[in-house]
Amino acid sequence: MIYNLDKINEMAEGDQDFIDSVIAVFLEEVPEDLEKALQEKDHDQVYKLAHKIKPNVDLLGMEQTRAIALELETLGKQEANMAEIEKRFPMLKTDINQVVAELKNDFHL
């Protein structure tokens, strides 16, 4: 399992609707945002996507994914070579796709 719900459970204090809401937002927005940033090859979009993804993957206990998002955020902000950014996107996309599949399966969505 690529994710861990400990942080969400702690924040939710037993509120299953809150947990479901966080997961629904993640499933709805993150994959779509990822594709958009990949297609546009725009530093600002990369920065914004990574900045948006970080707290979501942090809540889901995805430390490796959070580290990749932080790298991408920094590279986007610094307007680094797009080839450097593109090297990291497959790792992020793989992690996101895996957690989306796991969450859909585990939460019967």
Image (spheres, helix red, strand yellow):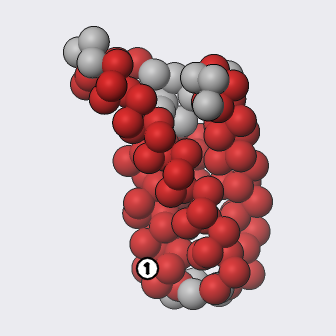
- Residue 97: image x %, image y %? 71, 46
- Residue 20: image x %, image y %? 42, 29
Q: Can residue 4 be seen in this view?
A: yes
- Residue 33: image x %, image y %? 55, 66
Relative placement, left or right, of 109 versus 60 is right
Relative to 107, say whether 75 is above or below.
below
Relative to 76, say whether 22 is above or below.
above
Question: Looking at the figure, which quarter contains the N terminus?
Answer: top right
| Three-letter amino acid code at the position of disc 1 | Lys
Image quarter for residue 19? top left
Give SS at disc 1: helix
Relative to 69, say whether 75 is above or below.
below
Residue behind mark 1: 77
Q: Can residue 10 be seen in this view?
A: no
Question: Looking at the figure, which quarter contains the C terminus?
Answer: top right
- Nearest the viewer among 8 and 92 is 8
Residue drawn 34% across the image and 19% down it = 16
Q: How crowded is mark 1: few (under 14 residues within 10 Å), some or many (20 or more)?
A: some
- Residue 77: image x %, image y %? 43, 79
Q: Residue furthest top?
A: 14
Q: Residue furthest front?
A: 109
Relative placement, left or right, of 22 versus 101 is left
Residue drawn 53% across the image and 85% down it = 43
Residue drawn 76% across the image and 60% down it = 90
Q: How many numbered discs sit on the rendered protein? A: 1
Residue drawn 57% across the image and 87% down it = 42
